[in-house]
């Protein structure tokens, strides 16, 4: 049985840990509120620009725009994997890494084996995980979430777009955690470039009231565009790509804070349960020690009287 000193040391240690996890939960909750505000503000624009792009594509020959063109031999692939910079967020990072590894081992196994698979990892956890395993990493976006700005999304989108236009890769996919609510996220692998002919719908998009199949019915009578559909696409497509990356970053950031808040809440609860158990053991050990001392004193007194 552990000594009283050992039990006191463990109680102090667990108590300090509980205070730390409680503070981290409060910090994560504050960050989550701000992250939720950002993603709820960004979603309507991201959904609407995607809706407009989908409609405009139906008005032109998509072969005239390079970012719409699917290549016959898509033998080079770039995966943009968005994780966090820090841990202590439950299975948040491991879930998206597992999704990426599952896709690599199945859909992109041939690309990996032939050296035609490239990764851009936004966030320290994903970057270091895949760097240790020898993958070809494009760019370094560790620390991106320390101060998340739209310029980060602009750079990531530019890396993917420029590499596609230069023929470095033929397909680009974005993998991220979509924020569903505080306690759960959706793991998403979204086609990014070439822009798919049919709009990619995530579970949140599908359940959002503003994004229903009848939303495009207002375009039944096609308007006349000035200066023209092609010119409008040339302006909208880069904005669309930048904003899709920005939305994915915001989704991941909100998901991370929610996951960390839940993880720290669970850790605080577990620490409380452990403290109860340790204090019970401590009290029992203390009572045993007192009882032993009383027996020794009584035995000594009896022995002296008998002598």
Image (spheres, rainbow, N blue to C red):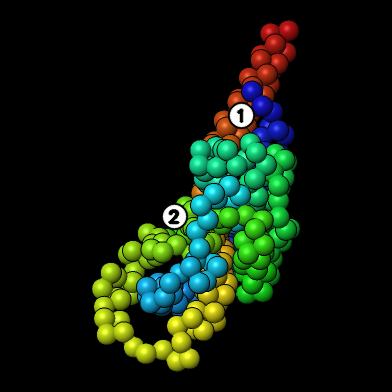
* Front residue (pair 162, 29): 162
Quadrant (top left/top right/bottom left/bottom right) for the C terminus: top right
Q: Position of residue 279 (x, y in %)?
A: 58, 39
Q: Which residue is mark 2?
A: 186
Element carrying mark 1? helix
Residue count near mark 2 (Cα–Cα under 10 Å), binned few <14, some 14–19, many ≥20: some
Q: Which residue is mark 1?
A: 285
* Front residue (pair 249, 139): 139
Identified at 72% across, 40% down, the residue is 134
Identified at 67% across, 56% down, the residue is 168
Q: Position of residue 164 (x, y in %)?
A: 62, 61
- Quadrant of the image occupied by residue 43: bottom left
Query: With 225 as the anchor, is 192 left or right in this view?
Result: right
Q: Which mark is residue 207?
A: none
Marks 2 and 1, Cα distance to the nearest angstrom? 48 Å
Q: Work out which residue is located at the far bottom of the displayed protein and give it.
A: 226
Identified at 72% across, 13% down, the residue is 304
Identified at 68% across, 21% down, the residue is 297
- Which numbered disc, 2 or 1, marks the residue closer to the eye? 2
């Amino acid at each position: 049985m552990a000594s009283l000193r050992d039990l006191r040391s463990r109680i102090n240690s667990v108590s300090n840990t509980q205070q730390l996890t409680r503070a981290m939960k409060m910090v994560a909750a504050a960050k989550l509120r701000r992250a939720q505000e950002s993603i709820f503000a960004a979603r309507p624009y991201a959904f609407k620009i995607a809706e407009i792009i989908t409609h405009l594509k139906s008005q032109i020959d998509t072969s005239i725009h390079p970012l719409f063109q699917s290549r016959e031999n898509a033998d080079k692939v770039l995966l943009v994997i968005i994780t966090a910079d820090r841990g202590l967020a439950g299975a948040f990072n491991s879930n998206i890494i597992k999704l990426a590894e599952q896709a690599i081992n199945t859909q992109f196994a041939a690309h990996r084996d032939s050296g035609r698979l490239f990764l851009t990892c936004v966030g320290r956890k994903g970057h270091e995980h895949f760097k240790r395993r020898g993958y070809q990493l494009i760019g370094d976006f560790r620390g991106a979430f320390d101060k998340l700005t739209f310029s980060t999304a602009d750079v990531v989108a530019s890396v993917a777009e420029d590499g596609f236009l230069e023929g470095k890769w033929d397909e680009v996919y974005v993998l991220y955690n979509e924020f569903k609510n505080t306690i759960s996220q959706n793991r998403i692998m979204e086609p990014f470039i070439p822009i798919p002919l049919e709009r990619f719908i995530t579970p949140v998009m599908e359940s959002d009231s503003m994004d229903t199949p009848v939303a495009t019915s207002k375009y039944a009578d096609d308007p006349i565009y000035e200066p023209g559909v092609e010119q409008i696409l040339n302006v909208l497509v880069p904005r669309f790509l930048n904003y899709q990356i920005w939305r994915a970053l915001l989704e991941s950031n909100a998901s991370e804070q929610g996951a960390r808040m839940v993880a720290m809440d669970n850790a605080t609860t577990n620490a409380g349960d452990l403290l109860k158990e340790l204090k019970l053991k401590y009290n029992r050990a203390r009572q045993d020690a007192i009882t032993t001392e009383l027996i020794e004193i009584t035995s000594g007194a009896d022995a002296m009287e008998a002598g």
